[in-house]
Amino acid sequence: MSVAAPPLPQTRGTGGRLPAGAFGVCAVAAAVAASSLTAQESVPGIPMPGPVVAIGLPVVRALLDIAAVALVGLSLLPKLLGFDAPERTEPVLQRVRPLAVTAAWAWAICALLTIVFQTAELNPGVVPTFGMIADYVDSVGTGQGLLFSAACALAAAGIGLMAVRFGEKVPVELRIIVALFGLLPIPVTGHAVNSIWHDPIMISMEVHVMGAAAWTGGLIVTVAFLARHHDLLALALPRFSKIATICLLLVSLSGLITGLGTMALTPGVTLPEAIVTSDYGLLVVAKAALVALLVPLAAHIRFRLLPAIRKGQATALIGWTVAEVSVMGLAYGVAVAITRSSIA
């Protein structure tokens, strides 16, 4: 009579939901705090947005990023798990697919709400009407970018519903591409550069946004769903680690190019003075410091915890992941404030 093998040790931690919660709380808190600290001072005679808009806009914008990160991570997980052992991976993926649809809907709703809040910001003291919102979308590139992003999110929700019904018969590559494609308009909602370097700066922004979403979303989802399944974690985490290394390099390089390039190409702004004299420059420094802080945290997971996980040993992965994604959340919150800050 065969004897069942003993279960592999479980990764220590109170639950996989902690990283997701830590990321969300830090992102929203940092977005509100940084936006409040860098808000423009009121000028006598010029109406300013009320507190609902001043606080609601960064909150909704942060929630948009959270939903996008969640969708990208949930879309990546099937690829990280592979398709060689569906009897082991399918129970996990059956939980993941409906959540991907929910994240896509949340993304679309937050993108549309952001349009409403930004319309209200340009028309202080007035409740936006449908006509005002339509005019904003028609005349401002930010509105058009958000509307296109919402459309991509709705497309991702439709494809996700097909995956809920038909499983992995719906190509995972399609789900990943649509999720990442929806991120492309996001940089349009930030600062624009009017020069011959506009396109390279925009490409750098898009690489930055996609790399950050894949890195953050992949880590959160991998730990959230696999921390209690050591055999699957040992399968997926090494694959994700390779992706994370590439994303770290892309995010770091593209972030510097975007931040410094935007300041250098903005008329009336001189470097290096603008780095410490403008809200934009100070926020770029803060975000760069947070990304630098991620390096030792990510390195510890890859070079200290990953070998132990491969050997089936219990680790403090959840605790270290919470630390890393908390810093990521702070960086995302600062990024929200960067899109709204003054460069000069």
Image (tube, rainbow, N blue to C red):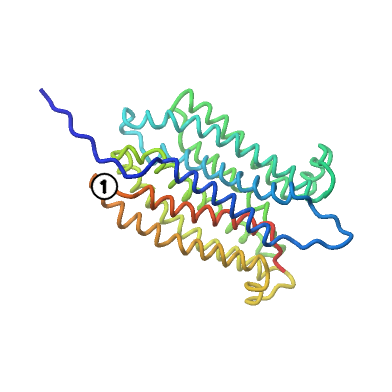
Describe residue 311's horizontal placement relative to residue 325 as left or right.
Answer: left
x and y percentages locating residue 44 in the rendered image: 87, 62
Query: In this view of the protein, which residue sits in the foreground, 214 or 341?
Result: 341
Query: In this view of the protein, which residue sits in the foreground, 43 or 176?
Result: 43
Q: Residue farthest to the left?
A: 1
178 up-or-down from 38: above or below: above
Describe residue 231's horizontal placement relative to residue 163 as left or right.
Answer: left
x and y percentages locating residue 298 in the rendered image: 40, 57
Quadrant into which the C terminus falls? bottom right
7 up-or-down from 241: above or below: above
Please identify the quarter of the rendering in which residue 39 is found. Answer: bottom right
SS type, badge 1:
helix
Type of residue at label 1? Arg
Describe residue 206's horizontal placement relative to residue 37 as left or right.
Answer: left
Q: How many marks?
A: 1
x and y percentages locating residue 225 in the rendered image: 40, 38
Q: Which residue sits at x=71%, y=72%?
A: 269
Describe residue 285's horizontal placement relative to residue 18 as left or right.
Answer: right
Q: Which residue sits at x=30%, y=49%?
A: 315
Quadrant into which the N terminus falls? top left
User: Label 1 belongs to which residue?
Assistant: 310
Q: Which residue sits at x=40%, y=58%?
A: 297
x and y percentages locating residue 228 in the rendered image: 34, 38
Query: In this view of the protein, which residue sits in the foreground, 62 or 213?
Result: 62
Query: In this view of the protein, which residue sits in the foreground, 208 or 115?
Result: 115
155 up-or-down from 204: above or below: above
Please identify the quarter of the rendering in which residue 78 is found. Answer: top left
106 up-or-down from 248: above or below: above
Mark 1: few/some/many CA within 10 Å (<14, 14-19, 20+): some
